[in-house]
Image (tube, rainbow, N blue to C red):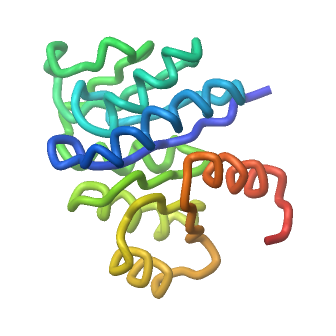
């Protein structure tokens, strides 16, 4: 049986302390569910925090890297996939995830959420700001879910992957 892959997307250098704390906790919770974590793989921001959280709970982490630079990889990534595609790698992140979680918001994260909605992927927004929530919900009410905490995210993922009604 194929493992469930949860993609956590979020700011790198522009991540807030709240983004980092939420991402770390999400990584842990995802690992505790025995799901695979997928991130952008770099050793910064939300990617690093989520990866470290998953490793803390003995989880499995895939990193989809925008470059070929091995020095940019988080040490918590188990499988690093080097794309040399820059931001175009965002589509790989999205298409390889069963559920996408936006933990904070930046331009790169916004592009990933947009790609996810275009691909009819379920997206959970955590700590993204009211403007982002309103904008993405206006694009797709059916695929955008709002969470207030990492625990809410896990609850929503369970509902999504088991096709429970909301």
- Give coordinates of residue 141: x percent, y percent: 59, 81
* Quarter of the figure with residue 131: bottom left
Quadrant for the C terminus in the image: bottom right
* Quarter of the figure with residue 92: top left
Farthest-out residue, bottom: 138
Residue placed at 35% from the left, 48% from the top? 18
Q: In this view, does 54 lie above or below 125?
A: above
Q: In this view, does 21 lie above or below 90?
A: above
Residue placed at 55% from the left, 18% from the top? 60
In this view, the residue in front, 32 or 81, is 32
Residue placed at 44% from the left, 13% from the top? 78
In this view, the residue in front, 79 or 27, is 27
In this view, the residue in front, 4 or 8, is 8
Quadrant for the N terminus in the image: top right
Q: In this view, does 37 lie to the left or right of 77?
A: right
In this view, the residue in front, 121 or 165, is 165
- Give coordinates of residue 149: x percent, y percent: 55, 53
- Give coordinates of residue 99: x percent, y percent: 59, 50
- Give coordinates of residue 21: x percent, y percent: 39, 39
* Quarter of the figure with residue 143: bottom right
Residue placed at 18% from the left, 14% from the top? 70
Q: In this view, does 37 lie to the left or right of 24?
A: right
Q: In this view, does 1 lie to the left or right of 70?
A: right
């Amino acid at each position: 049986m194929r493992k469930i892959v949860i993609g956590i997307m979020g700011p790198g250098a522009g991540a807030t302390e709240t983004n980092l704390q939420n991402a770390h906790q999400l990584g842990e919770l995802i690992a505790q569910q025995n799901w695979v974590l997928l991130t952008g793989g770099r050793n910064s921001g939300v990617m690093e925090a989520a990866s470290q959280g998953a490793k803390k709970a003995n989880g499995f982490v895939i990193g989809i890297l925008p470059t070929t630079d091995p020095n940019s990889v988080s040490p918590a990534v188990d499988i690093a996939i080097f794309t040399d595609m820059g931001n175009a790698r965002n589509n790989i992140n999205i298409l390889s995830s069963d559920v996408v979680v936006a933990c904070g918001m930046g331009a790169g994260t916004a592009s990933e959420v947009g790609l996810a909605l275009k691909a009819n992927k379920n997206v959970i927004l955590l700590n993204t700001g009211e403007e982002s929530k309103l904008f993405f919900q206006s694009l797709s009410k059916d695929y955008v879910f709002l969470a207030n905490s990492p625990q809410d995210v896990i609850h929503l993922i369970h509902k999504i992957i088991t096709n429970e009604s909301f």
